[in-house]
Amino acid sequence: MCVLCGKDFVAQVHWTDRHVEDRARASGPGTDPVEYQRDRRRDRIHRAALTNEVLRHYGLKLEDWNGSKYLLRDRKGRSELVQDLGSLWPVAARLAGRMPDPLDPALQESLTSAGEW
Amino acid sequence: MIPVTVVTGFLGSGKTTLLSRVLIDPSMKNTAVLVNEFGEVGLDHHLLRRVDERTVLIGSGCVCCTTREDLAGALLEILGMDERADIPTLDRVVIETTGLADPAPILYTIFTDPVLQHHFFVDLVVSTVDAVNGNLHLDRNPESLKQVAAADKIVVTKTDIAEPDSVMSLISRLDAINPSAPFIESAFGEVDVEDLIRRDGTAARAVARTDAWRAGERHEMGETHSVSVTFDGAINWTAFGIWLSMLLNARGEDVLRVKGFLDVGEPGPVVLNGVQHIIHPPEHLQNWPDEDRRSRIVFITRGIRSEDLVESLEAFGGLLGARPLPLVAEHSLSFP
């Protein structure tokens, strides 16, 4: 963190990011930082891809942004940065105009049919 | 990291009596105790602090995502004393809540405070339920229900003055609300301290009582439902994180509890433990604690039908990489 981006200081690691943080701690001095960075980036891209399977139903798209945040876009060109999955869903609800809910039958329908073809 | 044990339970359910017995034990010598009120049962302990409940609701927060400033302050003070070596090295902190308290904000405070999260972890939530009045409390007080749902262990107190039948009926009701928590019966506040405090003991005890435990039946207690689920293979942890974070954002206040082991295709399971919106930092274990290598999760919900949860997991099956199977009686499993 630098003084300029201090307002984005992340005091709380979201629980879904915890294994990444744990790995960073475990990979102390002497380990290959490049490998860790590569793993981490792969994780983030994988997460964005999986999340997009769900977000598609709401007309939204998520992508990794510089390996530090995620960029969430809608089809009208609006976009917002989010830190993690914890802060993603409230923003997604605002952009989509409805609350993304895994219990929503319409979402389940769209996920099941997407899996079929 | 210093373990924090939260003792909760409805008014008059015997929290202080239990604590006063437990704290005499020599193994509890270096334990600091935080209580909300000095009750009639005097607690005699050299590291006793009283905290006044001061709750700070953070912006757009629900009730469970509130910070207990009083608690943060008291824990920081204890931490300071410990680090300056003003007191003998601290083994544990016990927090006794008021009878009406929702335990979730206590967990939230410890997990989110920028300092506390690096020095303390919640190892156990113990709920006391009074064998005489427990049924009445559960009928009338939603707080009582939340305390049972949040428990890792349940101590049924006053079994000495309750009818054996009513103790049995209370236990089967508690079991239906929270199938993941083992029971400890306690008369006159007597309890095996080792049994109560031991963290890794929970799985073993749950196995021991599986005969009496109707695993996987969908239990419906009024508005509260609980369901145990396993999967037909290893699941994708990232996808599960997406599903659960989405569920908690949409329905967090109705998900009273999520607890279990998840097989994520690594040598050991991920230990998942959540109370409402608040998820303990998931632990990736090196090894499975027992022979059984299947995922097992319990969901305790309010107003969400078990079928709906299972259907949702089914729809996410493509992303998760495995299909959910609600557990039935022959698959008794133990929970962390």
Image (cartoon, coloured by chain):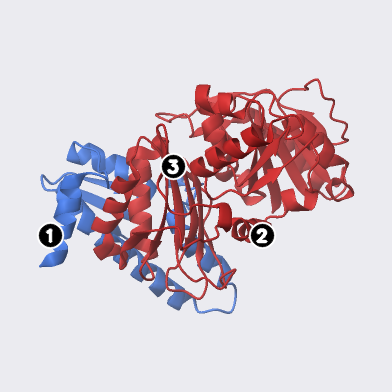
| Residue B232, quarter of picture | bottom left
Q: What amino acid is at disc 3?
A: Lys
Residue hosting label 2? B200
Q: Are marks 2 and 3 on the same chain?
A: no
User: Which chain does the residue under circle 2 lie in?
Assistant: B
Q: What amino acid is at disc 1?
A: Ser
The residue under the point 23% across, 37% down is A94
The residue under the point 17% across, 44% down is A78
Q: Do labels 2 and 1 share a chain?
A: no
- Secondary structure category for the residue under label 3: helix
The residue under the point 57% across, 28% down is B135
Quarter that holds the N terminus of chain B: bottom right
State whether residue B269 is above or below residue B249. below
Residue B279 in the image, given as x and y percentages of width and height: 49, 48
The residue mark sitting in front, 2 or 3, is: 2
Chain B tint in image: red
Quarter that holds the C terminus of chain B: bottom right
In-front residue for pair B190/B71: B190
Q: Distance between the residues labelled 3 and 1?
A: 42 Å
In-front residue for pair A110/B220: B220
Q: What amino acid is at disc 2?
A: Asp
Callout 1: 10 Å neighbours few (<14), some, many (20+)? few
Residue hosting label 1? A113
Chain A tint in image: blue
Residue hosting label 3? A7
Q: How far apart are marks 2 and 3 (CA)?
A: 40 Å
- Secondary structure category for the residue under label 1: helix
Are the residues flagged by discs 2 and 1 in contact, CB closer than 8 Å?
no
State whether residue B110 is above or below residue B42. below
The residue mark sitting in front, 3 or 1, is: 1
